[in-house]
Image (cartoon, rainbow, N blue to C red):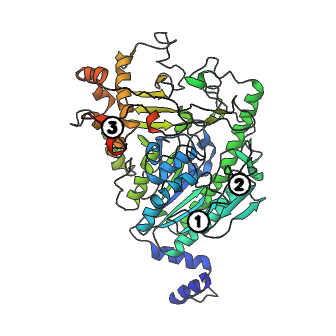
Amino acid sequence: MLTLLLWLLAALMGARTTATSDQEILNSIAHQAKTSKYNIVFVLTDDQDAELGSLDHMPFVAKHLLARGTNYKRHYATTAVCCPSRATIWTGLTAHRHNITDVNPPWGGYPKFAALGHNENYVPVWLQEAGIGMYYTGKLFNVHTVSNYDSPYPGGFTGTDFLLDPYTYNYMNSTFQSGTDKPVSYEGHYSTDVVAEKGFALLDQAVESQQQFFLTIAPIAPHCNIYMNGSVLAENHTFEFTAPIAAERHKHLFSDVKTPRSENFNPDEPSGVSWVRQLPKINDTVIEYLDDFYQARLQALQAVDELVDGLFQRLESYELLNNTYVIYSSDNGYHIANHRLLAGKSTSFEEDIHVPLIIRGPGVPENHSTNLVTTHTDLAPTFFNLLDVPLRPEFDGKPIPVTQSGLETALREKHEHVNVEYWGFAGAEGIYSYEPSLIENNTFKALRIISEDYDLYYSVWCSNEHELYDMRTDPGQMHNLLFEEEVLSPTNPSFLLGVPVQKIVARLDALLFVTKSCAKESCVRPWSSLHPYGNVSTLEDALSPLYDHFYEVEQRRVVFDRCENGYIIDAEGPQFERDGIMYRDGLPWDTWV
């Protein structure tokens, strides 16, 4: 069929097939297909940090994206583990709304995503219904397996080639599944290179279709390597974690590079709360291993860097650079020896939630960076906005501006909050682990508040322990201003931003009370839920003495009733209340119980 189509197109153009290459014909198709409509290519890596310098070692990302696009330096994942984070990207909902809160059943993974009905109601379905060709290769979700890939097939796609468990994280023994075909093993082939080839093939299909398109390329790098003897759905399954595996051509690189020795790298004094504060200092043997692990992450990212180069070569050859947005990000960040943690994620420390976001495309400022605060909750509405598709009313975020004027306007609006949430387990990756290997009760709600004048982190754990860090003076989050044994110590001042610390806590707790159960507009403008007349839109506004009684006396506090490993509403404590009515997901509580 493709050969016939190419022959007919060549004939229509008055060219002889013997003198015209397939590539030339595809270039002509791309040229004819260009309209005022824009395309998107989304490169989504797995576990890539924005705090530990990984982008500094990716020259093609620097060349094609950082030098020719805008770097959103204040972009955050709202849940620091893959499935909940990816569910937020593909639904436009916060985790407490889409209720995918773990990587595996019963709290997460592809089976739960489908069981909750998201497979019929998420970005690919909605955009395909709007006439966009949807293409995807690489990792979609955990527990998307060689056994359940067709029950159901992921909805909303025009062309696919998915990585499947139990081989998703096996760099040298991956299995892919295309369309409705049976899974195919690529044992002996390097996973990221296979993803690149499949991504380029899907780009060819998208160009050939002459249709506006959205292509996602989702390699697993720099995630650790995992050998699994079967899916987590199988009995007696086992896991073996190792450092990421590099392509043979990259294994010699970065031999002299070590994990950045920041202030919070394996500190002499403990930090944080709950189980994190109980961690012992890491010994030299493990530190040496973690340095090797860090090197392996950088090595594994080199194939992704080459993928980016190949992608731009093809977009240029198709003359699509002027009407295609290329977006680069990661599902969550990563820590290595920070706060005495081993290799992994699942905390709300900056290493785990601060992730890359770079956008290049029509009207996007080149070689530009912005401090605009953005989150993964904003990506779905951004996709819709760039593709000129009406926004969905259920979205919990808002479109990220991509033009110079849009960025300047957004900065003046002073959007300053990031809503962070997590439930359940934490663990370490690699050959070393914690005791026990899976840490329970790692459940918390948190806020990042960032402006020109302040930079704060606030959290409440399911144990009802509290954290507050002044990130301007303590960027490593080493000195919890609310840790009982340190309150009033020289490192923990009783005043912050010119007012008593507890006045700030009262405001942040009230804001967290809204965001932990917000929906739609209350997620975008949570201060307006507290001040519906619009007289407060920032922490600075809320600190007026006029509101002392409102925040310090009238407001209910964020309190957990108990720790749970998933989102169970009656464990979450009181929900946001307005006019005497308690709300959940923006609706009166009595409609839910």
Q: Are marks 2 and 3 in contact (CB under 8 Å)?
A: no
* Dot 2 or dot 3, earlier in sequence: 2
Looking at the image, the residue that sits furthest to the top is 489
Q: Amino acid at mark 2?
A: Tyr
Image quarter of the N terminus: bottom right
Q: Amino acid at mark 3?
A: Pro
Say if 231 sits above or below 461 in the image. below
Residue at 33% x, 49% y: name it: 405
* SS at circle 1: strand
Q: Which residue is mark 1?
A: 160
Q: Where is residue 92 shown, x and y percent of the image?
A: 43, 51
Q: Are marks 1 and 2 in contact (CB under 8 Å)?
A: no
Assess disc 1: are there few (<14), some (14-19) or many (≥20) residues with their C-alpha within 10 Å of its C-alpha: many
513 horizontally vs 176: left or right? left
77 horizontally vs 140: left or right? left
Q: Which residue is mark 3?
A: 526
Residue at 64% x, 31% y: name it: 260
* SS at circle 2: loop
* Dot 3 or dot 1, earlier in sequence: 1
Q: Nearer the viewer, residue 35 or 584?
A: 584
Q: Which residue is mark 2?
A: 167
297 horizontally vs 109: left or right? right
